[in-house]
Image (cartoon, helix red, strand yellow):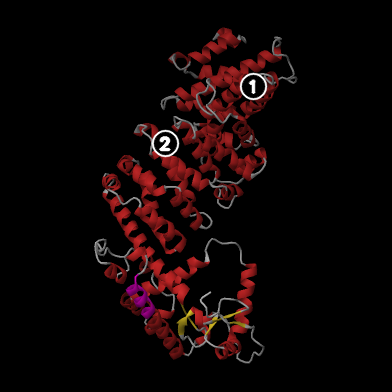
Amino acid sequence: MRDARNGSRNHLTAMMLAIPALGSLHTVEVVALFCSFLDASKIPSNLGFSRTTDNPDKLAVNCAFVSFQGLAAICDIAQPANSVALLAPIAKAWPMIYPWLIVFYTVYNETFKNDLESRSDQIAVIGNSIFRLTREPSIRLVAADTPGVFKFVAKLWKEEPSGPPPSRTHMHAGTAALQQLLLGVKSRTPLDEVVEAIGSPKAVVQIGLSRLQNALKEKRLAVDRISYYVNVLNTLARGSGHPLRHAILHEGGMAVVTKTLLKLSSTDHGFSDIIPALSACFMFLHNLVEAEEGIPWVKQMIDEGFFQAYVNTSPLFAKFNSNLQRITFSLVGDIIPRYLVFRTIVSVASPALDQLDAADVHAKIARSPARYQDAWDTMQRLAKDRFTLRELADFMRKELGCCDYCRKPSSKTSLRRCSGCRTTLYCSQECQVRGWKKGHKMECKLKQEEKKTSPATFFYRDDHGFHNQLAMTDARLNARASARWLRVTSPTYPTPSLACTSTIPSSHLFRAPPARPRLDLRNAPVGERRARGAHRGGPGEGDRQRGADDVNRITSWVGRVVDDRGDTDARHGVGRTRGERGAPPEVIVPKRNGI
């Protein structure tokens, strides 16, 4: 220690290497010795010294670099009994340490510019030491408040190789250091510094996703690296409304992480090895699935095999910690069922779940806790019922409609379409003219303007139509319960008009319907199968006829209720001026040949 204090680099290096093994070096004096070599006043003014020539400036840089690694080693071995005494001086010295990091990066970039492997090793040691230092919360808080530190670490992250890490660190230190520093950060400034260092949000995301995809292509999955890669994406996406989150979503982040989860769940790694990576993937999906508009992200998850990954992982759920159990349960027990009100999600969820209706799948689910089993069964049942409703809604949307003025139900092939908004239907020229005078003149303009000015949305037109059918169906199924609910909460509300309003309790709209016995019609005569809707996987003749009868009954009922209330204008949602005059647009008469 005396020789090291006198500036002997060899003795200083020996002390640094002996710290993990020698308890006698775990003292405040050793920390003070390392900090003395990192005094900002000792930074050389000239950094252009030769690699082979010994001089005081080069010796000062080398001793400071060894001392920097020594402080990282102290952080590794600090115990609760002496952690405050050992780590407090390091946190206090961080403002002096950070300028030295710039010196190390500059010197080794220049010194090893023709030796890329040695340069990569030295840069990795810098990142590794930053990671080990900032694992201590007190040091991490001081480091995160240092101007420019995120920009510097982002450079280390950008320059690290995409393949296996350097042998000296056994990890991708830039990735680990960036993820560590971003922990707990709530302001936008660190994320802005990362974007500034890399160039653009898209460039940042492409680096992160490409490294994760390359790791998935390796024959033997590097689970620890995958965990760090996903955690970096997760921390970069924490800023709500930040361009980085938008870029991660729109560059396919949900799809890539779902593929990662599926591949991890299909490997034969031990539980202790794979749990950090599984945890990182589940947390990423849970945090971002409802960001912006959730429909496309839920769809990407399902398309890329989330249900299969969930089944593969289900035997491990009992071993997860409470936070991870909450996250995994909410995905299947809450989030995905709530999105089964969208036709887009129903169309992919039900077929994906049907493919998992096998004995081995049920055996895996049975090994999970009881509440997971109940959530899975409820989601499956809900998806099947909604898929059946979707088929009926598709039939009604294509075949049936009603006049916007007189509310007379009819097939769409016999109705006329307004050529202005191209959405409103009429049964005759007379109804079209009357509807124009009664208020469609204003409504038509509003609809056309909405098409031009409405922002891009993932709430597709088919989803909107399915929503209407779902609400109407649920209103009929729960009419009595809804009426009782209205009598209690709104005694003056006219309950007969319930069918033409949207005042339906959300608990009715989103709950899973009860299980119903299903008939096995595989060996039944074709005629019976067709009548019951089991022929060729589509609605049968009986279903079609019942669907047509339901539509006629519902539309006529709604029309009578609206007419009885004398509030025809209100159903359009816009003010009406009966005195308005003007020629209506040309009515498009559908062709009679079925085209």
Left or right: residue 507 compared with residue 157: left
Mark closest to the chain's N terminus, 1 or 2: 1
| Vertical order, 251 against 224 (above or below) | below
Estimate how packed mark 1 is, as few (under 14), some (14 to 19) or many (20 or more) residues with alpha carbons within 10 Å: few
**In the image, residue 494 above or below residue 110:** below
Give the camera-side residue of 549 and 457. Answer: 549
Which tag is nearer the camera, tag 1 or tag 2? 1
Within-10-Å neighbours for mark 2: few <14, some 14–19, many 20+: some
The front one of 499 and 144 is: 499
Residue highlighted by disc 1: 116
Bounds of the magenta span?
Answer: 540-550
Q: Is residue 258 above or below residue 350?
A: above
Q: Position of residue 342 (x, y in %)?
A: 45, 63
Question: Does residue 565 sit above or below 461 in this rendering?
Answer: below
Residue 154, given in percent of the width and then of the height, sits at 61, 35
Residue under the image location 52 percent in, 78 percent down: 593
Name the residue tied to disc 2.
276
| Quarter of the view holding residue 173 | top right
What secondary structure do most residues of the magenta stretch adopt? helix
Q: Nearer the viewer, residue 458 or 272?
A: 458
What element does badge 1 sit on? helix
Three-letter amino acid code at disc 1?
Leu
Please name the residue shown 49% across and 34% down the image: 217
Q: Cα distance, mark 1 to mark 2?
A: 32 Å
Identity of the residue furthest to the top in this view: 3
456 on left or right of 273: right
The answer to whether the residues at label 1 and label 2 have Cβ atoms under 8 Å apart is: no
Amino acid marked by disc 2: Pro
588 vs 498, left or right, is right
Residue 310 visible to an observer of this rendering:
yes
- Closest to the observer, 25 or 301: 301
